[in-house]
Image (spheres, rainbow, N blue to C red):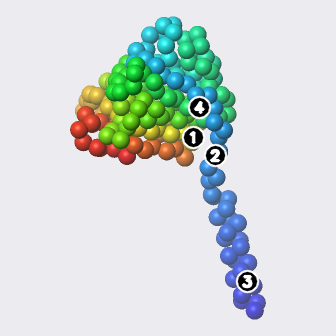
Amino acid sequence: MKAIRTLFQAIMVLALVGALFVTVPQVHATGTTITVNTTSNVQTDGHCSFQEAVQAANTNIAVDGYACPAGTAGAVDIIEFHIGGGGAATITLSNWVEITDPVSINGATQGDVSSGPLITITGNVLYLLWFKPGSDGSTVRSLALNSTGSNDITPRTSLLLYSSNNEVYGNYFNTNGSQPLGI
C-alpha cells in the first residue's frame, strides 16, 4: 500500500511539474472587420489597400480617413477582401508587411476559392508577410503568396512566422496557381 501511495505521489508531482510547461493558447475576442477594396497602395485615395488594412489592425488607428477603420486593441481583427466585382486580384508589395497584432487574413471573402485562392500577394521583397512576436493567434487563409526574386545569399520568403498558435490553411506558396503547392 505504501508503494502505491509513493507511486501516486510521484505521478502527481510529475503532473504538476508538467503543467508548468504547458502553453495555454490565447483566446482573443473578435475585433474590427477591415475590408480591402483596392489592389493599389495609394495613400489618401479613399480606398483601403492591404497594406493600409494591416496598418489599421496593427495600430488600432483608422487609416486613409475612414476607408480602413481602426483595429480593436486586444482582439483579433479580420481583414477581408472585396476588390472589384470579385474574382482574381493581385496585390503587389514594394515593402514587406509586418504584422504585430493578432489578425485573421481571409482571402476566401473575395469569392469561390474551390479551385484555388483568388487573392495573390506578390512582390520582390525579402518577406511578403512577417508575423512578428505579439501576433500570436493569427490566421492566414486562402491566399496565393508569391515572393519573387532571390539572390545567392538570401532567398525570398512568402510567410515568416515569429509568433505562435497561428493557423495557415488553403494557401498557395510561390506557385503560378497551376499546381496546388501549399497548405
Sequence-wise first label, 2 or 3: 3
- Residue in the picture at 34% in, 44% down: 182
Q: Nearer the viewer, mark 2 or mark 4?
A: 4
Q: Position of residue 92 (x, y in %)?
A: 35, 21
**Height in image: 22 above or below 116?**
below
Which residue type does callout 2 highlight?
Gln
Q: Is residue 35 visible?
A: yes
Q: Nearer the viewer, mark 3 or mark 1?
A: 1
Q: Position of residue 88 (x, y in %)?
A: 34, 27
- Residue in the picture at 58% in, 28% down: 33
Front-most of 97 and 106? 106
Which residue type does callout 1 highlight?
Asp
Residue hosting label 4:
77
Which residue type does callout 4 highlight?
Asp
Question: For mark 4, does the 10 Å Cα neighbourhood hold few (<14), some (14 to 19), or many (20 or more) residues?
Answer: many
Residue hosting label 2:
26
- Residue in the picture at 64% in, 46% down: 26
**Height in image: 62 above or below 155?**
above
Q: Is residue 30 left or right of residue 166?
A: right
* Mark 3 residue element: helix
